[in-house]
Amino acid sequence: MRLLSVISSLLSINSSIHDVLASGPRVNLTIGVFEGLEANGGIERFLGIPFAQPPVGSLRFKAPVPINQTFTGVQNATMFGNACVQPPSSSLGAPTGEDCLFLNVWRPENVSTDSALPVLVWVYGGAFNTGAASDPEYNATILVQRSMEIGKPIIFVSANYRVNTFGFLASADMAVEDLNNGLQDQSAALRFVQENIVTFGGDSSKVTIWGQSAGAGSVEAQIVYNASAGLFRGAIMDSMTGPFKSSPPPSTYDAPGKPFALILNATGCSAGPTAFACLQDAPTEVWQPTVAPGSFSPARASETIASGEFLHIPMIAGTNLNEGNSFSASLLGLNLTGYTQDLAFDNFVRASVIDQTLITSDVLDQFHKFYPANDPSEGAPFNTGDSLFDRAAAWYGDFMFLSARRRFLDVAASLQPTFVYHFREFIPGNNVTLGVSHASELPLIFGPVPAVAAVEDDFAITWRDFYINFVNDLNPGSAWPQFTNETRQVLQLKRDNITTIPDGACAQSIWSSQA
């Protein structure tokens, strides 16, 4: 018996030694102790940390609720949490589930709680209907490694937010405080960062938020609606969207054929106050943020922007040369001419927004003037000769991205330091029909650059350095002059030709100021 006792003791000691040796880095957060992954390439990672209560059961379709408990024991932070519910995809990097409000942290190894490193928070895109922080494309290892190499180390945070039905359910019968929950999730994550980032070695006063596409629109929404005042000091917006394609009142979603009516039909639920208790998870692909007095977004973004009553912080923003191409691919090869081409173009325009009341015949006539058939300049130098596709792609890029960027920054530039870019580099291996397409910059910034595009390596490093400089100093560096309404100079981002260029003739948005 004594021998068995000794063996048992030795095994226990050996197990304890193994636990100590094998344990990853630990952080003591407001909600408990979390253990992450051991350093790899000089970077430690903490994955799947909850920042709000699971939005399930009675909290489904409700604004995020802070975690009101401290977890006992050491919590595992070595795997991504669920991606939020959305159509199946191989690119999410995690299973989907309604319990999805998790964030992730990348930091240099050997930092301490007094390191006070600046922080970059990533907000993914996906048209407010798809996307996840666990997407392998958003691995921040290379970005953080580069920050260490140039002596400007940063901490990187990515967070999930609810998308589609679960993040943007809207109806006149819905409580205004529960509208746009996806955007409210982002604010909740930023509050969690403020409360906990010092434990990771970060400085809560030096947070920059960065997003692309709908993520950029989300960042702009946080700025425009002052929803997260004091939670960040700088912003980066790649392919900013204005911040929304359209933001109709909640009642718009109740009309026949609109999203809320469609989901009721799909589930057999009845309209009215009892609908929310009945609804099951049946996401659709047409949800957008909404505007309602007393909600996260109490007024149309255009009105708030025009007033200048938004957060005045340094920002970077820009667009790609062919933003609209990938959104217009359904029109390729239809071979329509004359009236039938115009009709297809008009239908494409109408289908791009939920509230179509502003797209009157007069507006469409103006669009035909700006984007006529058989105009070889549309999409150049990557125009395909497919007239319908080229004109639709040019329209979509101008009106959903370029004019939206100009509308905001023309006001913002007089109120705060603003840096603007135009990305014009076609990356080898990409689809020529799509040109310098939407999101094609992300592999350059996050890395690694695909082997077929190795020629872009130095350019990618330069772009990363611009963003790392901004996160540290609120300025991308001397090579990137500030945008002003007097000079209207933007930085052309193109391999071997990074230079300032004029912003060009403004794409005249003829939408109502209510758009």
Image (cartoon, grey):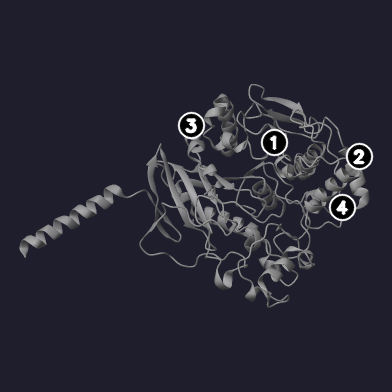
Left or right of 337 on screen, residue 412: left
Q: Is mark 3 on a helix, strand or loop?
A: loop
Q: Residue 369 carries which label?
A: 2
Tell which circle, 2 or 4, labels the residue nearer the N-terminal end: 4
Quickly name the residue at label 4: 359
Residue count near mark 1 (Cα–Cα under 10 Å), binned few <14, some 14–19, many ≥20:
many
Callouts 4 and 1 close, C-beta under 8 Å? no
Q: How far apart are marks 1 and 2 (CA)?
A: 24 Å
Number of other residues with Cα within 10 Å of mark 4, as a class: few under 14, some 14 to 19, many 20 or more = some
Please report whichever mark, 4 or 3, sits nearer to the chain's N-terminal start.
3
Callout 2, which amino acid? Answer: Lys
How many angstroms separate mark 2 from mark 4 (CA)? 15 Å
Where residue 84 sits, quadrant-wise, is bottom right
On the image, the x and y values in percent for residue 349 come to: 82, 49
Occupied quadrant, residue 393: top right
Q: Residue at x 52, y 65 (%)?
A: 54
Residue on which the image places disc 3: 151
Mark in the foreground, 4 or 1: 1
Q: Element type at marker 1?
A: helix
Task: Identify the mark at residue 434; answer none if there is no mark.
Answer: 1
Q: In which quarter of the image is residue 164?
A: bottom right
Looking at the image, is mark 4 or mark 3 nearer the viewer?
4
